[in-house]
Amino acid sequence: MKGLLSPSLMCADVLNLERELTVLDDLGVEYIHLDFMDNHFVPNITLDTGLIKATKRVLKRMKRDIHILAFEPQQYFDAMEIGDGDIVSVHYEACENLAEVLSDIRSRGAKPFVAISPDTKPEVLLDYLSMIDGVVVMTVYPGFAGRPIVEGSMEKLAAVRKMLDDSGFDLLMEVDGHVSWDLCGQMRACGADMFVAGSSSLYQKGLDIKDAVARMSELVK
């Protein structure tokens, strides 16, 4: 399958978010990445639940890729109106009852993904592979845009890809963190299927978003 783009809305022009969404949708971009942070699991607050809910009114073809960086993520599902077509990623490190959370996401018609932070070993995923549609591998420490890639991330991506392939399940691997022009091709070669593109690529200052999307699509095809 071709590589899928998921531009990060937290890196877009905050005063023109509806326009940014419409442009990406019209360009045929597959997903929009929506980060929700609670200022506890990570030391930041980004897009709130009301804004994430409101994106449903704007999107025509593009699907929501909702990344919840928060403890007890279920408490936010109703406010975000999680449903058909959504990808919803929750963190292994933030869920005491991960299987229950994944089941809740599935019951709403959304696709459950598990995200793992850089210091988390891929093996923790083994018990959950039958419950999910994909894995998000964080290649930076979560919380802020523009952070440097963590050493050993390419090896980790390759290890997760092998684990998913060996499982016998048809699972996607999404990479989130410093998906730059220089590194996205290497990430693709390590088996990544989806690419969260932000300040190190699509949203670099001075770039036309149409040109940037075309360039990134070519690099991860």
Image (spheres, rainbow, N blue to C red):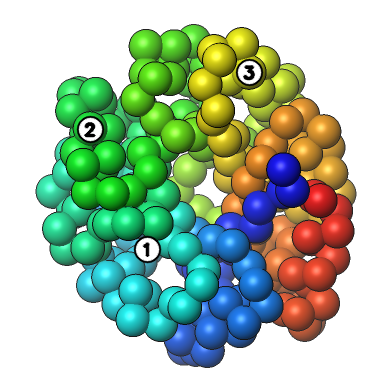
Residue 9 is left or right of residue 101, and the answer is right
- Mark nearer the N terminus (1 vs 3): 1
Instruction: Please indicate whether residue 86 sits to the left or right of residue 23 in the image.
Output: left
Q: Residue 216 placed where, x, y %?
A: 79, 60
Residue at which label 3 appears: 165
Q: Residues within 10 Å of mark 3 (few under 14, many from 20)?
A: some
Residue 103 is marked as 2
* Percent position of residue 44, x then y: 36, 55
The reply to whether the C-beta atoms of the residues labelled 2 and 3 are less than 8 Å apart is: no
Q: Amino acid at mark 3?
A: Asp
Which secondary structure, mark 1?
A: loop
Q: Residue shown at 72%/78% (left/top)?
A: 209
Secondary structure, mark 2, is helix
Q: CA distance from mark 1 to mark 3?
A: 33 Å
Mark number, residue 46: 1
Q: Give the amino acid at mark 2.
A: Ser
- Mark 1 to mark 2 CA distance (whole Å): 26 Å
Which disc number belongs to residue 85? none
**Which of pointers 1 and 2 lies earlier in the amino acid sequence?**
1
Residue 25 appears in view: yes
Question: Seen in the image, is 1 located left or right of residue 173?
Answer: right
- Left/right placement of residue 154 relative to residue 24 reads right
